[in-house]
Amino acid sequence: MAAIKGRVARRRRDFQAQTARVLVNGNALVVIEDLNTRGMTASAKGSAEKPGSMVAQKSGLNRVILDKGWYGLETALRSATRTTGTRIRKINPAYTCRGEEHSGRRAWRLQDVEPSRRWPGP
């Protein structure tokens, strides 16, 4: 089982490195969400006096969140930007959805902005 998990981890790191290289080579600015994974994966057990609810579901969600390796992608991006001059900006993840289901209006997207008002680059 350890060999399989090691293989999965190596593949994830390789994917992160390749994805980071593609993003950095094709863009002057890479914007990522400033996700609080520690808060997102906090335990739902609660205490002896007030036990948590849906602990098994939260445990499964935590496993999936940590399995994605978001921090590893950020680290790979930072490493890849050293040689290209690409900048990384972290933004607040609030209101970054691309659909109308949350706010009743379309969220901002780069494609919706006039070309003259887009980020000018480095």
Image: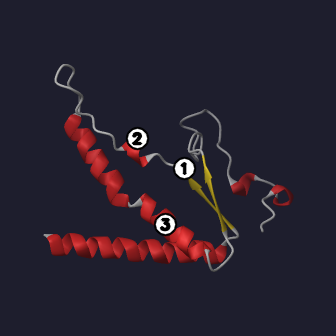
Q: CA distance from mark 1 to mark 2?
A: 12 Å
Secondary structure under the numbered disc 1 in the rendered image: loop
Q: Residue 54: x and y, percent?
A: 23, 32
Contact, mark 1 vs mark 2 (Cβ under 8 Å):
no
Give the Cα distance between marks 3 and 2: 19 Å
Question: Label 3 is placed on what type of residue?
Answer: Thr
Residues under labels 3 and 1: Cα distance? 13 Å
Quarter of the view holding residue 69: bottom left
Secondary structure under tag 2 reads helix
Residue 77: x percent and y percent? 54, 69
Q: Residue furthest top?
A: 49
**Split into 4 quadrants, where in the image is the C terminus?**
bottom right
Give the image location of residue 39, x and y in percent. 40, 41
Q: Quadrant of residue 42?
A: top left
Report the residue at 28% width, 38% height from top. Answer: 43
Please name the residue that numbered disc 1 is placed on.
Answer: 34
Please, which residue is most extreme toward the left here? 1
Disc marking residue 53: none
Q: Amino acid at mark 1?
A: Asp
> Tag 1: Cα neighbours inside 10 Å, few (<14), some, or many (≥20)?
few
In primary-sequence order, the first of circles 3 and 2 is 2
Mark 2 closeness class: few <14, some 14–19, many ≥20 residues within 10 Å = few
- Mark 1 and mark 2 lie on one chain; the one further toward the N terminus is 1
- Left or right: 35, with 114 as reference point: left
Residue 57 position within the rendered picture, expressed as x and y whole percent measured from the top left: 24, 40
Q: Is residue 26 above or below residue 64?
A: below
Find disc 2 in the rendering and name its residue: 39
Callout 2 amino acid: Gly
Residue 113 in the figure: left or right of residue 44: right
Q: What number is the disc on residue 75?
A: 3
